[in-house]
Amino acid sequence: MKVKNLVGDRFKERPADCIIDSHALMVRGGYMKYVANGIYSSYPPLKRITKKIEQIIREEMDCIDGQEVSFPVALPGSLWEESGRYESVGAELLRFKDRNGSPMLLGMTHEEAAVHLVREYASSYAKYPIMIYQIQTKFRDEARPRAGLIRVREFTMKDAYSFHTSQEDLEQYYEKCHKAYERIFARAGIPEVISVASDSGMMGGNISHEFMLVTKVGEDSLAICSECDYKANIEAAENIVHNQNTLPVDNLRLVPTPNASTIDEIAAFLKVPIMNTCKAVVYQKDLTGELVAVFLRGDMDVSEAKLTNYLGDNIHPALLDENSPMVAGFIGPYQLDNTKCTILYDQSLSGIDYLVCGGNQIDHHYTGFNILRDIGVVEYKDFSKIREGGICPHCGKPAITISRGIEVGNIFQLGTKYTKSMNMQYLDNKGELHYPIMGCYGIGVGRLAASVCEAHHDEYGPIWPITIAPWQVHLCCLRVDDAMTKEFADGLYQELQQAQVEVIYDDRDVRAGVMFSDADLLGVPIRVIVSPRNLQENCVELVTRDKVVNTKVEKTLILTTIKELIGNMLKSNTRI
Amino acid sequence: MKVKNLVGDRFKERPADCIIDSHALMVRGGYMKYVANGIYSSYPPLKRITKKIEQIIREEMDCIDGQEVSFPVALPGSLWEESGRYESVGAELLRFKDRNGSPMLLGMTHEEAAVHLVREYASSYAKYPIMIYQIQTKFRDEARPRAGLIRVREFTMKDAYSFHTSQEDLEQYYEKCHKAYERIFARAGIPEVISVASDSGMMGGNISHEFMLVTKVGEDSLAICSECDYKANIEAAENIVHNQNTLPVDNLRLVPTPNASTIDEIAAFLKVPIMNTCKAVVYQKDLTGELVAVFLRGDMDVSEAKLTNYLGDNIHPALLDENSPMVAGFIGPYQLDNTKCTILYDQSLSGIDYLVCGGNQIDHHYTGFNILRDIGVVEYKDFSKIREGGICPHCGKPAITISRGIEVGNIFQLGTKYTKSMNMQYLDNKGELHYPIMGCYGIGVGRLAASVCEAHHDEYGPIWPITIAPWQVHLCCLRVDDAMTKEFADGLYQELQQAQVEVIYDDRDVRAGVMFSDADLLGVPIRVIVSPRNLQENCVELVTRDKVVNTKVEKTLILTTIKELIGNMLKSNTRI
């Protein structure tokens, strides 16, 4: 391939709408083009990268006895009705009707399709374990697509589904898949990816892990213990709070709090520590509109994931107005009408004797509120997010640090949620019927490409690892107007192609600066520069994109040097 | 891969709903599973076949300077509004709204997306020619999916788009692509595919060809001249009719024709040759409901494709009732109210002096109808289908034969339909703006797989060509209970895998009959049978699926013999 024929433009200016570097560089480098919100076309360099990533994934899935299959992108609604997800999943599931009015949907995950494919086949225990996977287009109608390929609506995903006859067998396979994932990320050039315990959300099941690239621009928050090996998505990490009561014995009193409505203002106005305030956060269930009030310590935040899991319903922040049964800004548990909303208490309130809370009328709060004395026995649950310095749920030390990460893959132990609801059964060796136990395993291909770019780039462009780089060698011919130089570079281009080296060749009549900045944007690991000056010294220049190698190579040694360098680079990316 | 682990069932009974052999065999062989009307999942054998087909296509597209890209499956409606196809294409275009109510569609072809991808890039003549292609899922909401993978709603397609600065350049490229297609079909094992002139339909443009596998179960009809090299889809072949008037001079007379309503009954009742009858076929435009009456010779059939092209509107057969301005069964051109419907004359009526036609009242027809005398000058156009024995539009001889074919690919010269409507322009070397000229080129991957099966199978299963077969070698171990036999077969399995031979191994404890019928259904070209009896003779049995080879091979020669056979098979499939 010659740069002059390569479809797509490369340019200098950072697009204004790109909030993260990988997005900006992949637009500037001619990798992708915006088609609609969260929907992109890929230019050849990105297509080459994703094909290589897909091949790495395929090899590792085959290595753990995966069988590649293919499920439809457009699925009949009836299939998701079997599992109950046609109703339970929110607006991110794109539902539509075909020409005959039949309900359909665009697959965003394929548990139902996987069960459908093997339901009859896997009717005997002797057929187990089974793992099937596909690499296919998915659609998820995200409310807020962002950050280029990190959160899109249409994406290519490898999704795998395993079926087992015992929890032990699932766990063993889960561990094998965990290791395969580590190999995939290492081979793709980001061995630094960590796995964290995660929230299973709408997938069902209990144990699940996310593979996270830790980076400031990540959209997930991770709780990592600095004292033990605990790592979890904050949505999954229990928020353990040990309260020490700091206020003297007091009675419940309604006090006016004019001009104070935020927790900070009220704490300051009433001169109580913020840890002695009780905050209300109110949601509504998506389907019924029913109100749900969560009370928690004033300095804590609600984890909507924990709340959703507890309720088993999707929720959104409530819109309160004068007709609501609550007074926005002044909501407290005392004398709040529990027939008009569900009232929940976060465990961060447990063990505090005297609290300030909303007075349920404008510009008023209660002080000296004691939950046990004034309300009675309530059930405390974990609805809030763990924070920096929080208590590690594993070792119990106050050693939690919060980092941000991009989720590049996930694995779930699903249990029998889908096999039960879709009535998939097998006969064991005693002739008894059982529901198989499932696992599922996902990796987003485009997001992985963008994550590698995010992890490995400089201000000039991506620094692609050789395993997924669009080409292995970028050959630059400076001064194509010099016949000898052009002839030598042309010959080298031929020679590299014949030696099966993936080479992109820049023989445009442009300034060296333009040539090098385009090469930086394409991020090819090995650059070979042919120029009249080098040729006078009987050599060419060989530079790696990561600047580790910068040397001159004698003309007759070029091919062997390049092949050796490629070999070494490939080796260093595949070791694990 | 071992047969005992291979996901999917194989069975004997032909499913009742399979009208063609390839469909039946691919269901019976565990290749595919019905998910919804025209929507299937693929089991591993089919996935392996389609991946190989995709790789052949990719290599041949790269060979003619194609650059692989990727367009979205879900496209914004606004993109198709630019070309006008959002409105003009019928219900086969699946339109829906996303969560924000924005109109979207599932891509069934990607001219608009292709123009969108290169519109800014290709702003100078120096960037041309360009060819971009993708291999991607498409959706076409067919009214009548049928015949397994032949006509589905969701399918994987290679679609390519080329852009040129002159018609000559397009034509040269078109010819190159035509040759690449011939190589693709030859490599996939069906070199017998022919190319025929086709109707461009909704794609726009003029010249186009379809690549057809001639087979009785095809859904297209082809006009092939036995005297010259003319080949065309009957929708594209001009129907030339030379009429010889056979009736004596007559006057127009309205006659009662009780109990005669079909053309045959009327011709018999009035004792006139059917070639002297004038038939009416009435349609309605899909959008407006406007009536269109086509008059043609009684023994001819309307080509809806020709009619649609002429009208520029989609049509459907009219539903006539008592409120219609026409009397169904008795419609004739004489005194028919042309303010209430469009009246068209097929050229098959030209040159007949006296006709029988409908009387526009129940149970009446006219005889002695002379179009010029009774109506005046009318315009005759080609709206009817060419027939067996018809006149060849190329050599003029009455030598047309009608065959049936499956369309496995198509190529179109699109002209500037899309570049003009979507305002894609380039500057030529004089600084003047022009619209580039486009071509587009499609191949359905699944349909190609099914077509190969249709062309090459016996009653027991598909006979896959080695280039696309799911595996190269099917190793059968008869009598796994015999330790020596099992050990030898296990060893051979290892040896073949190490030698990079794609092998599927059947070491199930089943009867030879079961093993062989499953092998027949998997259709792997080379079968190696290990049994105690063969081993006693120090050999194994080697049989090809097409029964050309059936021999015993000495144990030490197995690997070399197999590799040689694979090599020969690959060679014979790639020569062209």
Image (cartoon, coloured by chain):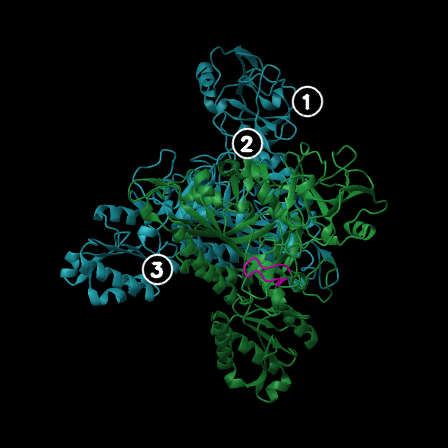
Chain colours: A cyan, B green
Q: Chain of mark 2?
A: B
In the rendering, at what x and y percent does residue B109 appear?
Answer: 52, 47
Judge if badges 2 and 1 mark residues of a common chain: no
In the rendering, at what x and y percent does residue A445 appear?
Answer: 46, 49
Prevalent SS, magenta region: loop
Task: Judge left or right: residue A505 versus residue A156.
Answer: left
Q: CA distance from mark 2 to mark 1?
A: 34 Å
**B15 in relation to A315, above or below:** below
**Membership of A73 in magenta stretch:** no
Q: Give the magenta-colored segment's residue range.
A: B390-401
**Residue at image location 48% in from the left, 70% down from the top:** B574
Q: Quadrant of residue A292?
A: top right
**B229 in relation to B370, above or below:** below
Judge if badges 2 and 3 mark residues of a common chain: no
Q: CA distance from mark 3 to mark 1?
A: 69 Å
Among numbered discs 3 and 1, the one appearing first in the sequence = 1
Q: Which residue is mark 3?
A: A502
- What kind of residue is marked 1? Thr
In the rendering, at what x and y percent does residue B42 appear?
Answer: 60, 57
Classify mark 1: residues with Cα within 10 Å, few (<14), some (14-19) or many (20+).
Answer: few
Q: Quadrant of the N terminus of chain A?
A: bottom left
Q: Quadrant of residue A495?
A: bottom left
Front-most of A185 and B475? B475
In the rendering, at what x and y percent does residue A548 appear?
Answer: 25, 54
**Residue at image location 74% in from the left, 52% down from the top:** B247
